[in-house]
């Protein structure tokens, strides 16, 4: 009985975490899908979002959930700035150039953040209670993070499906030349997609702190970059929706496999969950290089 | 900077007249190089100190990794090396004769806390361990586990988690079911904060908690608010410890070196008014131990001074200093246990250092979120 209770509570937590993982990967996938740019500096933008939530709460007592808007605006502006100053010039360069550029920008942002905010691990305590289940306790902050993540993904979906700009982005993803022939200003779409991708990523940093309100640090992004790549590949690189679903799969796998691995005597299940996740990634890449949920 | 603690002790010794060996009085002089935290540099610099500068008493570099790199070089040239920044036990299990330790080794990090709980409440027996899967925290908690069993604790749960994890709930849900009285664990800053924060979220109430590293910093309380109340952490030294000539006398030890007030004053003179000492007390103690041992040996020969260290024991600003003759490991110094009480970091153990009584059992998470703090 204890086994099923634990499995159930781990799966609940895994699902909540998965929602955050999913949204935190959509920006990465969007940028890759539209611009074919691999954003290896991904984690630095998540860190910016985390600090946005932290500072807004610490300095002005603004509830972290409200920082979502602020983070989105910061991210959109920053993304646009980076596109116009750097990425625009590199669009026709080999993929390695854009990869290195994003790597450099990521480090630049982290070091700049360290200069202003210092190397300490900070956090905040936004106590709004929680729900008590017989098997576990779930704080409302985590539920907030999960629900926000779903709402934002849904809004984005509607925007992509219904608006002209959204359709134009999809057209560029499918066929760049074709879109150009139809009169789509591809450079504008690139700028918009890049800004939106970075905006989403910074925003997801706020949700990350709603889930884990402590351990906020200028170098916190590294672990999220790693996980985001796994999730992005799992979801089929370049597909934001695939990434969102894959986030759930990853969260459920990460937490669910813990209980199952714990059944093997003599192993430390937690260390092994990461092994399982990455072994899974390798297998998927070997069998289906376009990703689990990716097209042909 | 590590340098400051050393400079404080050197200034104090020289102001007192220096070290007397026979009829000669020696003043201390510090020769130092920047090792850039590189192992290769450390090795060549220690070699340079021993051969070019003809230094006989070396203060080890900062961190276990660098100390381990420097140790064979000191051993090769027969110069004494005193570790004030390397807590690893491993360094002292390699059979080096000329390497001694001032810092308490990793194996003692959580034992003081267990002693404290055992003394406060012999019935709190159910102990759970949750720690980061890294060399240092493993060394700390393996030793603590062994020590706990000797004290009569029952280990009801033990699991590690990988570095960089963002959700400890799989482990903590399991831990909750084992119904422990006491939890020890942690590893670094981020995971220590996460551990405390998720214990609160999952409302895992226990009588006492000690977490490595994280709670010792003010950022811990800033991040967790009243949830940090009652949480303990081990530290080598803290501003406010009560070690004094009187305490030494009471316990039957000799006192040597500046008092706490003198230490603070000299430190501010050297480092600047805005600086607060932390690990610097260990550095000062390392210098003091050299001075004391040289006077005892009445010789500047490293071999004789090392021998004199074998039965040297004294109390100073940093606490007790006494090595294990066999390994050179620090055996006399006790980790001080800090505990968050009413938003302040108090020293609660050992009794000789404490400036407050331990808060035990700590308030429950529900009580804390209703505003209850330690001491109310």
Image (cartoon, rainbow, N blue to C red):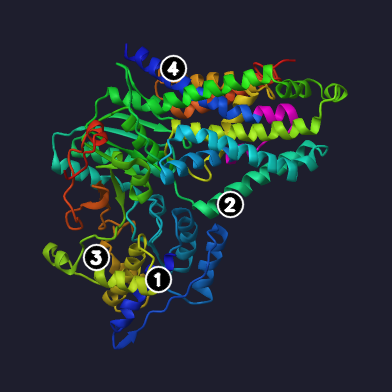
**What is the chain identity of the residue bearing mark 3?**
B
Residue B78 found in image quarter:
bottom left
* Dot placed on the residue nearer the N-terminal end, 3 or 1: 1
Residue carrying label 1: B272
Give the percent coordinates (x, y) of residue B162.
46, 34
Q: Residue furthest bottom?
A: B23
Give the percent coordinates (x, y) of residue A144.
44, 25
Residue at (38%, 40%) from the top-left corner?
Answer: B193
Most prominent secondary structure in the magenta stretch? helix
**What is the chain identity of the residue bearing mark 2?**
A
Classify B110 as above or below B25.
above
The quadrant in which the N terminus of chain B is found is bottom left
Which of label 3 and label 1 is nearer to you?
Answer: 1
Q: Kindly report the distance in space between the C-alpha atoms of the residues bearing marks 2 and 4.
A: 42 Å
Q: Does label 4 lie on the same chain as label 3?
A: no
Residue carrying label 4: A260
């Amino acid at each position: 009985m204890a086994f099923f209770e634990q499995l159930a509570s781990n799966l609940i937590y895994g699902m909540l975490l998965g929602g955050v993982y999913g949204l935190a990967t959509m920006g990465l996938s969007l940028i890759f899908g539209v611009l074919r740019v691999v954003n290896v500096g991904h984690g630095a933008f998540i860190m910016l979002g985390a600090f946005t939530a932290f500072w807004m709460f610490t300095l002005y007592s603004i509830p972290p959930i409200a920082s979502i808007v602020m983070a989105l605006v910061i991210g959109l502006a920053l993304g646009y700035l980076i596109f116009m100053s750097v990425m625009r010039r590199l669009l026709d360069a080999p993929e390695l150039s854009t990869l290195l550029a994003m790597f450099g920008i990521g480090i630049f942002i982290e070091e700049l953040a360290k200069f202003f905010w210092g190397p300490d691990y900070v956090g905040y305590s936004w106590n709004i209670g929680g729900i008590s289940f017989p098997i576990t306790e779930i704080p409302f902050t985590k539920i907030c993070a999960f629900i926000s993540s779903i709402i934002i993904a849904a809004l984005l979906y509607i925007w992509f499906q219904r608006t002209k700009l959204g359709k134009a982005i999809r057209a560029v993803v499918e066929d760049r030349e074709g879109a150009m022939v139809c009169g789509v200003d591809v450079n504008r779409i690139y700028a918009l997609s890049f800004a939106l991708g970075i905006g989403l990523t910074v925003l997801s940093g706020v949700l990350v702190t709603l889930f884990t309100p402590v351990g906020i640090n200028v170098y916190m992004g590294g672990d999220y970059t790693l996980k985001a790549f796994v999730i992005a590949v799992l979801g089929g690189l370049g597909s934001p929706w695939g990434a969102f679903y894959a986030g759930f799969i990853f969260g459920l796998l990460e937490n669910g496999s813990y209980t199952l691995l714990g059944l093997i005597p003599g192993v430390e299940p937690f260390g092994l969950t990461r092994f399982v996740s990455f072994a899974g990634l390798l297998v998927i890449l070997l069998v289906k290089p376009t990703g689990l949920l990716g097209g042909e | 900077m590590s340098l400051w603690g050393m400079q404080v002790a050197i200034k104090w010794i020289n102001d007192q007249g220096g070290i007397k060996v026979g009829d000669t009085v020696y003043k201390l002089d510090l020769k130092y190089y920047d090792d850039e935290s590189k192992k290769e540099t450390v090795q060549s610099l220690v070699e340079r100190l021993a051969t070019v500068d003809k230094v006989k008493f070396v203060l080890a570099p900062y961190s276990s990794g660098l100390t381990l790199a420097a140790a064979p070089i000191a051993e090769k040239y027969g110069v004494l090396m005193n570790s004030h920044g390397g807590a690893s036990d491993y360094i002292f299990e390699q059979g080096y004769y000329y390497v001694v330790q001032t810092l308490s080794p990793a194996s003692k990090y959580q034992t003081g806390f267990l002693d404290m709980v055992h003394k406060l409440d012999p019935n709190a027996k159910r102990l759970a361990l949750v720690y980061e899967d890294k060399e240092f925290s493993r060394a700390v908690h393996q030793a603590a586990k062994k020590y706990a069993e000797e004290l009569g604790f029952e280990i009801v749960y033990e699991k590690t988690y990988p570095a960089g994890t963002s959700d400890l709930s799989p482990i903590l849900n399991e831990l909750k079911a084992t119904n422990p009285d006491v939890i020890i664990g942690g590893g670094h800053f981020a995971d220590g904060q996460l551990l405390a924060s998720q214990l609160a979220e999952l409302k895992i109430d226990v009588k006492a908690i000690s977490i490595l590293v994280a709670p010792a910093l003010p950022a811990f309380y800033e991040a967790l608010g009243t949830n940090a109340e009652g949480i303990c952490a081990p530290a080598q030294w803290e501003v406010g410890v009560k070690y004094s000539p009187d305490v030494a006398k009471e316990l039957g030890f000799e006192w040597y070196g500046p008092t706490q007030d003198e230490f603070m004053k000299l430190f501010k003179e050297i480092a600047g008014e805005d600086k607060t000492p932390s690990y610097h007390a260990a550095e000062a103690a390392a210098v003091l131990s050299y001075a004391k041992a040289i006077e005892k040996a009445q010789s500047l020969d490293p071999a004789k001074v090392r021998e004199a260290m074998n039965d040297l024991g004294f109390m100073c600003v940093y606490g007790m200093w006494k090595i294990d003759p066999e390994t050179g490991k620090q055996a006399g110094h006790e980790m001080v246990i800090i505990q968050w009480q009413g938003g302040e970091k108090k020293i609660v153990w050992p009794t000789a250092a404490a400036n407050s009584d331990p808060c035990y059992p700590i308030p429950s998470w529900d009580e804390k979120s209703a505003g209850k703090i330690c001491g109310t």
